[in-house]
């Protein structure tokens, strides 16, 4: 049964407040304007609008089937939207393919780990680093022969204690390590905006805590939009929380505000 | 220092093979040298296919056609324009192979997996059909005969032994380049595309372009082996270009181990040596044996031989430390 | 004018032979994701043995029965004996079918020798229907009738029966269909064998249309059938029919009016379709 939507949340209420507070001085990284996505007659996203400021950490929560992953796919370019506009760093990217968005500095991780299982840990990271550089077309030097990139790969891998395992295949790693690699790969290109789709999916709470710590350390300067079921993750990392419910953003605010919002509790937290 | 030594030991099998190949003409008789030449030429063809087949995951069924385009270009230019110089024939053959790859790749890359296979199949068959139907020019099913050994313009004429070394040198150069490509960032991008296309796009790779470039590089080396084959065998026939030839190259890769480069050479070795001995018993029944090879290889040796050898060698190296 | 009508009829006739061959290829590809490279070899198997039986017994019907059944039996053997061991590994399945091309072709060379063979036309289908100064053979007319009848039956099977509905569902999403508790295995086997039967059937009735056959005929037919799948679109009776008739007509018209480009016509069609409608003209 689909619970009825609380009617006393004015549309765009929180967005208005936010804009008044921030003013013009703060750089808007991502601007989403009335984005909608239909599959046939099924409306998965309905006129979603929001903005992300530079350096902000925002969590997107909502029950299963609320459209979180669809929104991520629309933002990263994997799924074409039905209507609306997306601007990234002031440039319209509504119809650009994922690879172009990536080279502009928009990176994402996947809910189901999408790594390169038959490649070594090190080569996974190097491949991610080369992705936004002209070196991705280089054909004669070994992928490990680029000193700067190798240094960066080492820094990244040392952060998650995987440098010692750099020569093992991804398929030989445990699930927790694969989830860490998933985030390392999306960070490797030093993106300006990072979309993390359920970074803690399938992790035990210990592993999840480690992951939260790691993300905390890694993304200090990066703008992050993340989805999660894990409330710890949301309330530790996010400065702002948006609640997506059947294709609409029905509430947003600080984690405390959201936690105390009775309507959100009823719909989201209460339904768990 | 220890690191260097380990690296050196790693290459011992390749070096041993290289020495054996260099010494071969003084060890084996002419029939065998001819067999080895053929193994090298088809080995190179299979290795070039492995770049897109094993590493990128593109099931191209027109590889022999591109090989044939290069070979037929050489043969036709020789026959109708009496061009003898290798320095004209080879670039012409290679240009035609690359041009064909550019066109075929552009058409076929609109599809994936089985549909890619289907389209490359049909395109390859176009070349095969042309070699048969334009029989006044190409000699039809009898083929295009009497293509001579290459003329390098250096004032000496080729003997079969020279031809063997010529093939060996070009083989080594080509494999060196293929090896470098595979270990480069671009080469890894191909493997990445095979394993997770969406992740590659999310990382900023223009997947289509990478596939296309790989297809053309692979076509270039198919052209190299086609030119070598035309000069070596002196005869290009439609059967060299058809889908059975493409399938043969594919099964070589499967037998040797796909996505391993060296596996393709091992597969070529096994198929040709087997053909050599089976044909010694009965020429007519070779296709049945070949068919059984396909079935057996797929059913029982899908991973291929090279990974097994590789693991074995790694164990040996571990023992030595 | 007479030439035009004859060319038109010949094109349709050739188109229906193509349809019989291509349907099986297309359905197997749509349902199981396998390009059965041995499909042409099954056509050839039907043509050789079916025609042999028909000539020996003077019965076209018996020839069709034996030719079709032989092809279906070989298809059954391939599917049950080999392909089923690697479901979802399409490339491996395809390579196994390529192995069967070599085996089947070579066995036929062994049994029948390498010489070209003529097709079988029963006495009651000798002669031609006059069209102006020219004539159109009765047996070709009969191929059109038989092909059209087969087409209608297959279409009804696909659209109006429960089995057809399962086949269509399996093509859309095999996993969901299996998840609904439907066992797809008998459907896969049945489709594979039906396709093989049709190929063998086409071998017997199509042999006179093609002007005889030899060891290479199976492959030639197979190439054209691939073209049919690309042009018409994969996985439906309608797609196979549209592709087959288009190619049949195009090839015949080019053969009559533009001999020099005849062998390219199919490829031109294919490339046009690929550029503008990559999934084929009829999409499910």
Image: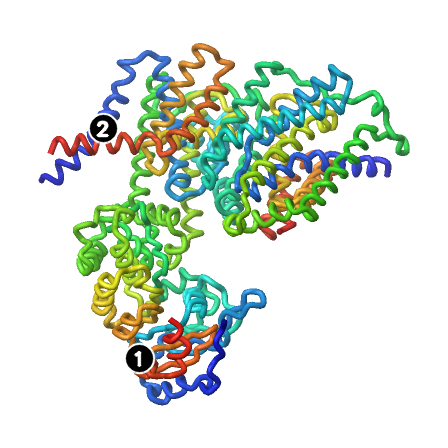
Residue C89 placed where, x, y %? Answer: 45, 39
> Which of B83/B285 is in front?
B285
- Disc tally is 2
Same chain for the residues under marks 2 and 1 in the image: no
Q: Is residue A156 above or below residue B135?
A: below
Asked whether the viewer can see residue A203, the reply is: yes
A108 to A135, vertically: above or below:
below
Instruction: State whether residue C112 is above or below residue A21.
Output: above
Q: Which residue lies furthest to the left in this view?
A: B1
| Mark 1: secondary structure | helix
- Vertically, is C2 above or below A43? above
- Residue under the image location 34 percent in, 62 percent down: A109
Residue at the spot 68% in from the left edge and 23% down from the top edge: C66
Q: Is B79 left, or right, of B161 in this rendering?
A: right
- C107 lies left or right of B19: right
Label 2: how many Cα within 10 Å (few below 14, some 14–19, many 20+)? few
Looking at the rendered structure, which numbered label has been put on residue A255? Answer: 1
**Camera sees residue A85:** no
On the rendered structure, is B251 left or right of C2? left
Please name the residue that numbered disc 2 is placed on.
B13
């Amino acid at each position: 049964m689909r619970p009825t939507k609380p009617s006393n949340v004015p549309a765009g209420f929180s967005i208005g407040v936010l804009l008044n507070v921030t003013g013009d001085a703060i750089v808007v990284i991502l601007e989403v304007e009335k984005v909608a996505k239909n599959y046939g007659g099924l409306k998965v996203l309905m006129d979603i609008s929001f903005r992300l400021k530079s350096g902000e950490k925002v969590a997107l929560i909502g029950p299963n089937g609320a459209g979180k992953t669809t929104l991520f796919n629309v933002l990263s370019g994997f799924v074409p939207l039905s209507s609306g506009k997306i601007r990234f760093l002031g440039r319209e990217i509504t119809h650009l393919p994922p690879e172009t968005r990536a080279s502009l500095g928009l990176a994402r991780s996947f809910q189901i780990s999408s790594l390169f299982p038959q490649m070594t840990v090190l080569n996974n990271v190097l491949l991610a680093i080369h992705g936004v550089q002209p070196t991705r077309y280089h054909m004669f030097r070994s992928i490990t022969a680029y000193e700067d990139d190798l240094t960066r790969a080492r820094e990244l891998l040392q952060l998650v204690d995987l440098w010692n395992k750099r020569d093992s295949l991804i398929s030989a790693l445990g699930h927790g390590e694969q989830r860490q690699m998933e985030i390392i790969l999306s960070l490797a290109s030093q993106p300006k905006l990072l979309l993390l789709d359920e970074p803690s999916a399938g992790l035990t709470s210990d592993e999840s805590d480690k992951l939260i710590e790691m993300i905390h350390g890694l993304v200090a300067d990066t703008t992050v939009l993340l989805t999660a079921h894990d409330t710890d993750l949301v309330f530790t990392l996010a400065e702002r929380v948006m609640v997506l419910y059947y294709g609409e953003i029905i509430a947003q605010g600080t984690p405390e505000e959201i936690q105390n919002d009775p309507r959100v509790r009823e719909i989201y937290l209460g339904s768990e | 220092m220890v690191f260097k030594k380990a690296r050196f030991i790693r290459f011992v099998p390749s070096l041993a093979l290289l020495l054996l190949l260099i010494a071969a003409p003084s060890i084996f008789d002419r029939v065998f040298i001819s067999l080895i030449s053929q193994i090298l030429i088809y080995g190179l063809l299979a290795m070039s296919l492995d770049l897109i087949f094993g590493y990128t995951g593109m099931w191209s069924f027109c590889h022999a056609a591109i090989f044939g385009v290069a070979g037929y270009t050489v043969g036709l230019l020789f026959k109708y324009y009496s061009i003898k110089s290798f320095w004209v024939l080879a670039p012409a053959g290679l240009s035609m192979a690359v041009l064909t790859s550019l066109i075929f790749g552009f058409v076929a890359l609109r599809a994936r997996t089985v549909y890619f296979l289907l389209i490359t199949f049909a395109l390859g068959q176009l070349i095969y059909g042309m070699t048969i139907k334009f029989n006044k020019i190409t000699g039809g099913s009898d083929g295009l005969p009497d293509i001579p050994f290459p003329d390098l313009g250096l004032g000496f004429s080729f003997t079969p032994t020279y031809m063997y070394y010529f093939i060996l040198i070009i083989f080594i150069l080509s494999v060196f380049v293929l090896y470098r490509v595979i270990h480069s960032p671009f080469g890894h991008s191909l493997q990445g595309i095979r394993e997770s296309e969406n992740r590659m796009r999310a990382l900023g790779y223009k997947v289509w372009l990478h596939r296309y470039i790989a297809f053309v590089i692979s076509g270039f080396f198919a052209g190299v082996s086609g030119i070598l084959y035309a000069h070596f065998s002196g005869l290009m026939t439609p059967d060299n270009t058809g889908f059975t030839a493409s399938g043969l190259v594919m099964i070589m890769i499967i037998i040797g181990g796909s996505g391993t480069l060296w596996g393709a050479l091992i597969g070529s070795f096994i198929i040709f040596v087997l053909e050599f001995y089976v044909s010694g018993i009965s020429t007519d029944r070779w296709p049945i044996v070949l068919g059984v090879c396909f079935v057996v290889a797929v059913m029982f040796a899908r991973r291929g031989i090279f990974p097994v050898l590789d693991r074995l060698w790694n164990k040996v190296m571990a023992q030595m430390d | 004018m007479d030439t035009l009508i004859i060319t038109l009829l010949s094109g349709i006739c050739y188109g229906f032979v193509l349809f019989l061959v291509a349907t099986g290829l297309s359905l197997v590809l749509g349902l199981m994701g396998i390009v059965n490279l041995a499909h042409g070899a099954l056509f050839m198997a039907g043509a050789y043995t079916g025609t042999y039986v028909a000539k020996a017994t003077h019965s076209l019907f018996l020839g069709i029965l034996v030719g079709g059944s032989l092809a279906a039996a070989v298809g059954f053997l391939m599917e049950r004996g080999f392909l089923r061991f690697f479901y979802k590994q399409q490339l491996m399945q395809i390579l196994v079918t390529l192995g069967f091309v070599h085996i089947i072709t070579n066995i036929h060379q062994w049994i029948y020798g390498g010489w070209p063979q003529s097709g079988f036309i029963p006495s009651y289908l000798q002669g031609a229907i006059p069209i102006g100064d020219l004539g159109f053979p009765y047996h070709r007319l009969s191929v059109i009738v038989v092909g059209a009848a087969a087409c209608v039956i297959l279409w009804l099977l696909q659209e109006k029966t429960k089995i057809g509905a399962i086949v269509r569902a399996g093509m859309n999403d095999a996993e969901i269909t299996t998840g609904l508790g439907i066992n797809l295995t008998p459907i896969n086997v049945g489709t594979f064998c039906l396709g093989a039967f049709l190929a063998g059937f086409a071998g017997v009735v199509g042999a006179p249309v093609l002007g005889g056959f030899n060891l290479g005929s199976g492959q030639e037919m197979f190439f054209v059938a691939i073209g049919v799948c690309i042009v018409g679109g994969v996985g439906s009776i309608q797609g196979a029919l549209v592709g087959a008739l288009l190619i049949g007509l195009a090839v015949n018209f080019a053969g009559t009016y533009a001999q020099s480009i005849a062998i390219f016509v199919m490829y031109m069609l294919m490339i046009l379709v690929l550029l503008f409608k990559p999934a084929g003209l009829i999409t499910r």
